[in-house]
Each structure stands twice: as structure tokens, then as C-alpha cells.
Image (cartoon, rainbow, N blue to C red):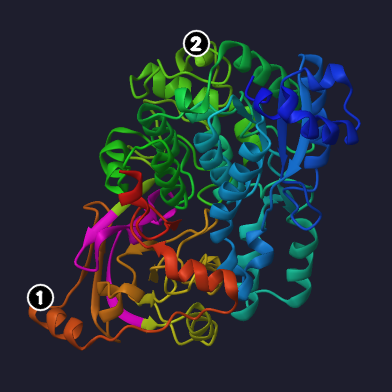
Amino acid sequence: MQSDNMKRGMQQAPARSLLNALGFTKEEINKPLVGIVSSYNEIVPGHMNIDKIAEAAKLGVAEAGGNPVVFPAIAVCDGIAMGHVGMKYSLVTRDLIADSTECMAIAHQFDALIMIPNCDKNVPGLLMAAARINVPTVFVSGGPMLAGHVEGRKRSLSSMFEAVGANAAGKMTDEEVRIYEENVCPTCGSCSGMYTANSMNCLTEAIGMGLRGNGTIPAVYSARLRLAKQAGYAVMDMLRKNIRPRDIITKESIINALTVDMALGCSTNTMLHLPAIAHEVGFDFDISYANPISERTPNLCHLAPAGPTYIEDLNEAGGVYAVMKELGDAGLLNLDCMTVTGKTIGENIKNAVNRNPEVIRPIDHPYMENGGLAVLKGNLAPDGSVVKRSAVAPEMMKHTGPARVFDCEEDAIKAIKGGDIVPGDVVVIRYEGPKGGPGMREMLNPTSAITGMGLGSSVALITDGRFSGASRGASIGHVSPEAAVGGPIALVEEGDTITIDIPNMTITLEVSDEELAKRKAAWKPRKPKVTTGYLKRYAALVTSGNRGAILEVPGEKEADK
């Protein structure tokens, strides 16, 4: 056992004395040491139930012959962090989570791990850590929130943001907003639509690191506790069979995940996180892989905000496995990939059933012939940009309009709510990328303001920041290179014509090459709008390419070679 490095032999007698101080018996010390990585806290609704899940996972490990020990991972709630400086800290926590978990697991020589994340950055951060640490690991998440109900209709957090925009437009009273406020988030759990948290939790099943139902069983269901116990059994079985994350997280399983991503219509943020996870196993994932996979993968689900169904509905319809069965039967998945069950993807999904063909469309009757995400390139985004195609109104699939340019989110929101943005406009928000923000803030507030003002089917938004899975409309984010490093988005001037062509996957600034070269020569870098210590370090080290906001110490690649 790996933990023997920490607890066997005379030299390790001091460590054993400290284990005694923990109250461990000799019998417990002799068992495999299993870390339960709990992201429980009392500020994130998606994490407030994780203490119970951790206890259930501990029971499962103990019943299966292991010695479970809990240690923490941090978590930020994007919804609570949004609209102020806190959003600059959200994405950067992914790397903090990965780094700190790696430190804890290796310092204490755990034999196996159970990861218990839930919200946006915890899932990818812990997947990155799992790949680095490479001891047997199972994911069991906190689970999705149930949808709220307002006026007889299911609602979610995106409805709340749009209600604020409608209020600013005079289309909703303060009292009507209050009713939304009190009803759209009725339980603990990750917000109930196909937003980033639920997208990544669903993709743990597609990659093979989570058990069946991990992405869809609601947080308040007792089935979630049973799943946690089963995760305990599974990780001990993996330990006996020596199945490790790098046996599961491979190029093939990540391509499987991207395929499932397209079918589900996941968040655009998956195009930041999947490349970062791939990077940990040595797979140089370029976001341009998305388009050929999207071209051959139909969009089978229209979950909120793209449609009227929610994660609880996907769960009742058969969950992620039912979606994968549709894809697998059509030859769109690699069925030989290993999973935490000790079986292949093909073996796991063999008996999955689609119980609701409106929630999960059959492969021959999809919502769209192409996948939910698309990568657009052109002279405005030479290295790519990402749009959630499944949430774009048909009339906005092709759009040409004048640029309305803003150098921060706050200025754009002020203009939108002030009525300065009109149908046909293309709102450009820049200097919000990984370096420029710094921190690559999520642009749910401006997209919701556009929708709430009734402009969702007539105004486009382009940014070098990122978008939430809750965003809808012609919202094109992750524009790369970002403005802070002199990308073309920094060169856009007020009134320039921009053409968005989603079917042809292009995004074009209608300015001559000569004019762009002239503007580039005159462009001067700006100092990043940093606030405190960690963001300063982040802005200094972050790379702002398509792989996402990954911290790299200068010279790291050369040292690795």
C-alpha cells in the first residue's frame, strides 16, 4: 500500500504516534487509508449537503475494508460571487483546488480517494487533481437542485437573473421579482439547469470517473446517499484491482465526454475545463476538436436554459447513461474505455433505457442535427471562441451589426439597462479574459440583462470573458487571443461591423487587414485590474490560450522535458 511509506518501519514511528493521536486503532492503521475530499461548506447551496454525503461515503469505505479520512476542498458559488469583484476569484479556484488536493493527498500518502465536489470549479479541479495523484479515485457529487416553481412553471437561477433584467426594462414589478427570488432555488444542490456545475457532473459519468446517476440524482434524494456508499465500495474494488485515474482519463474518454457534451447541450465552460483535464494526462486538447465532433453528434437534450426541462427530468428519463446508449448504438462513442466500476463504458450502458423521448430525443429525431456547442474562428478570434449553439434563437444564427464596445462588464450592463443598446447591435465586452480581468469573469449578468430587456433575439454579445451554462442567445465567449495580450478584440472600434455566422462557424470583424495591422501597431498593453495578492500572482502566471486558464510556472515545460 502507498500509505505504508507513511506508517511502516521504525523510521515512521513518529507518524504512527500522530495517527494514534487521531484515535486510530492498530487495526485501522493497518487498513488502506482512503481520503474523502469533501467540499462541504455553509455558503454554497450546492455544498451544504455534502457533509451527509461524506459520512455515507465513509460508511461505504469502512464496510468495504478501508480506513476513511475526510479532508476539505474549497468552493466558490458563482451566483453569489457574481456582480462584484468576487467573480474574479471564481475560475482561479479551479487551480487552487487541484493544487491543494494534490498537496494533501501526496503529503499524507493516501491509498485511494473519493472526491465529493459539486459546483463549477470543484468538479474540474478535482478531476485535474485525480489525474495528477493517480491513486484509485471515485467521484460522487453533491447533486443537482430541484427546479423552482413560479406561476405553475418550473424555474431556475437563470430565470432569476432574467427577472432582474425585466425589472430594469419596466416589464416586471419589484413584487414579481421578489416572488421569483423566494421560489427559483428551493433546495440545496447545484443549480437545476444544464449549467456548468451540472454539465461537469454529468461528464464525470461520460469520462468514467463517476458512478451511474452521479450527474443527475437530485441532491435531496436518498438515492444520493446510497450512491455515496456505493462509491465507497467501488473505490475499494478499484484499489484491489489497481484501476487508477490515468487508466480511465484518456484521450479516448475525453473525446467521449466531448461527444456527450454535444448531445446534452452543456455549458460553454466545458471548453475551458475539458482541455485543462486533458492537459493533466498529456493530451494536448485544442478546442477546434469540438467542431468535427459537433458535426457528427446530434443534440438530444434541450435542458434549461435552452429548453423547458431540468436535470431532475433528465434523471427520470434515464440519465446520462440513457443519452450515452443513444450515442453508443449509433457508433459515436468508444465503448472500450475503462470506468470506476471496473467495467467498460459499453458494459455500463448496455441496459440503459430512454424513458422519455422528449427529454432525451432518440438519435434519429434530435433537437438539432449538430451538437450543442460550436467553436467560431475568424479575424476577430483567430484561436477560437465558443457559443452554446443549442441556446441560440434561429434568427440569430447569422447576425451582422455594429459593435458597441465596452472595456468591462459593468459599463456594458449600465448601457444595456439604460436603453443604449438597440436591436441589431453587437455588444463587445473585452479586457475580461484570464489576464485582462484578471480571472476571466462569467458574463451571465450582461446576457441576462439583454434577455430581460427583450433583446435576446436581436442583440449579440462577444467577450474574451466566459459564459455561464445559464447564458442563452447569441453569446460568444472565450474569444482568444484576449484583449490583454493584444488579440484582435482589443482592436475593435465603436461602430465597426461584426458578422457572426454560426452555421459556418465564423466570426468576422469587417475591417481590412491593413487597417487591423495599423491598429495593432498603435495598441498599447494595459495593466491588469488586479486587487490583492493571489490575483496578482495569477495574472503574472496565467496562460490565456484555448486550453483555459491554467497556471504555469515559467520554465515548467522545459523542466518537464
Q: For residue 42, what is the image quadrant?
A: bottom right
Residue that badge 2 annotates: 347
Q: Of callouts 2 and 1, which one flags the residue occurring earlier in the amino acid sequence?
A: 2
Crowd around label 1: few <14 · some 14–19 · many ≥20 (10 Å): few
- Identity, as a three-letter code, of the amino acid under mark 1: Asp
Left or right for 95, reference 172: left
Q: Is residue 185 depicted above or below 335 in this figure?
A: below
Number of residues whose C-alpha sits closer than 10 Å to that of mark 2, classed few (under 14), some (14–19) or many (20 or more): some
Q: On the rendered structure, is 529 left or right of 560?
A: right
Secondary structure of the residue carrying numbered label 2: helix
Q: What residue sits 74% from the left and 47% below the top? A: 47
Q: Quadrant of the C terminus?
A: top left
Say if residue 13 shows up in the picture: yes
Give the distance between the C-alpha atoms of the residues marked 2 and 1, in whole angstroms. 53 Å
Q: Is residue 502 magenta?
A: no
Query: Mark 2 touching mark 1, by CB under 8 A?
Result: no
The image shows residue 509 at horizontal and vertical percentages of: 21, 73
Farthest left residue in view: 514
Q: Which residues are magenta?
A: 376-404
Determine the main secondary structure of the stretch shown in magenta.
Answer: strand
